[in-house]
Image: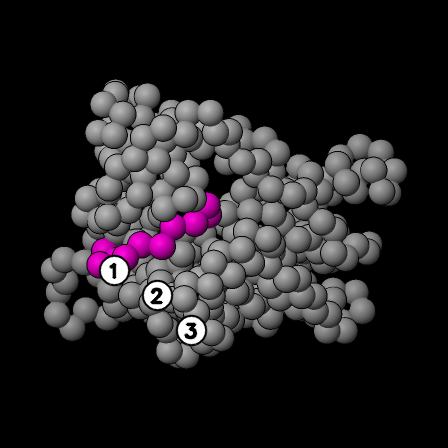
Amino acid sequence: MGAHRGEGHKHLDHCVRDLLATSWEKARKAIERGQIFVDGVAETDTRALVREGADIVYKPHAKRASVGLEPRVVHLDSQVVVLNKPAGMSTIPYEDERGTLDEWTRKELQRRTKEKGRPSLGVVHRIDKETSGLLVFTRTWLAKESLSSQFRSHTVDRRYLALVHGVVTSQTIRSHLIENRGDGLKGSFEHTIGKRQPNLKPNGQIAITHIELIERLSGASLVQCRLETGRTHQIRIHLSELGHPLVGERVYIRHYKGDILHAGRMMLHATELGFEHPKTLLRAKWEVPPPDDFVNKLDELRASTLS
């Protein structure tokens, strides 16, 4: 056991190295094994930022929590398969990654349909590894053409629930996303960090997020985000640049000046998905509630609000 007070938004591996008086390698391994707790929550990201005054505790016998529940098939027909993805699972492989959602889905289709060979599966969108919730794969060329077209024309309904830092006002954010906003991170042209030529026209892909406040909490808010466009990390970037990064955010939080609220992962859940079915042409929509870790964090923030 050991305890330490975090100092001024340092990276966790730095704090743990000081706490344990050990090497960088051993400090990082302790974090990755789930043996480091920040304000009572296991933190496995070595580069997580730690707020000033945070309680950091080393529990050498703690075991890293499992990734989460298995995916669940929400809808299956000859054209599409809609799934509820758990947090901690990638949509498709990165390099030699195993245990991804597409791999699991192919095995599940093979089990259910008794198909011979590798079932066909089309990827038309993705959600982040740490994000839970609804995602669709296509099973035919017709479905992939139809869904790809709907995503391109922004007619797919996508609603997310998010826990964010601070009190957010309902609003719509429009920006142009670029690969490097000046600090090595993907971000909005309108929030470019550093010098920019005056009167330079915005470039990058247009990104539009509709944000609605659902509930004010202690130092945080529960919001819903409706995507009009679906760019990579769009919600994370827009909320961070608004000054209200996701609770559990580890990347787009480096410029946040307030007290950091910790969580085991980003508190973002894809709760609603709707589109025109590629064969019937009827509008279909699905909704799934957030998982236990999201609900538990929400309850914790509600309890803090009442105390």
Residue 19, compared with residue 87, is above or below; it is above
The segment highlighted magenta reads 255-265
Q: How crowded is mark 3: few (under 14 residues within 10 Å), some or many (20 or more)?
A: some
- Residue 27 in view of the camera: yes
Residue drawn at x 12%, y 70% is 198
Residue 143, compared with residue 23, is above or below; it is below
Label 1 element class:
loop
2 or 1: mark nearer the eye = 2
Q: In this view, does 117 lie to the left or right of 28?
A: right
Assign the C terminus to one quadrant of the image: bottom left
Q: Residue 216 carries which label?
A: 3
Q: Which mark is residue 258?
A: 1
**As shown in the figure, which amino acid type bears the numbered disc 2?**
Gly
Image location (x, y in percent) of residue 126: 55, 52
Q: Is residue 94 left or right of residue 51?
A: right
Label 2 element class:
loop
Q: How crowded is mark 2: few (under 14 residues within 10 Å), some or many (20 or more)?
A: some
Image location (x, y in percent) of residue 285: 70, 69
Q: Is residue 287 left or right of residue 249?
A: right
Are the two marked residues, 3 and 2, in contact with CB atoms closer than 8 angstroms? no
Colouring rule applied to residues: one colour
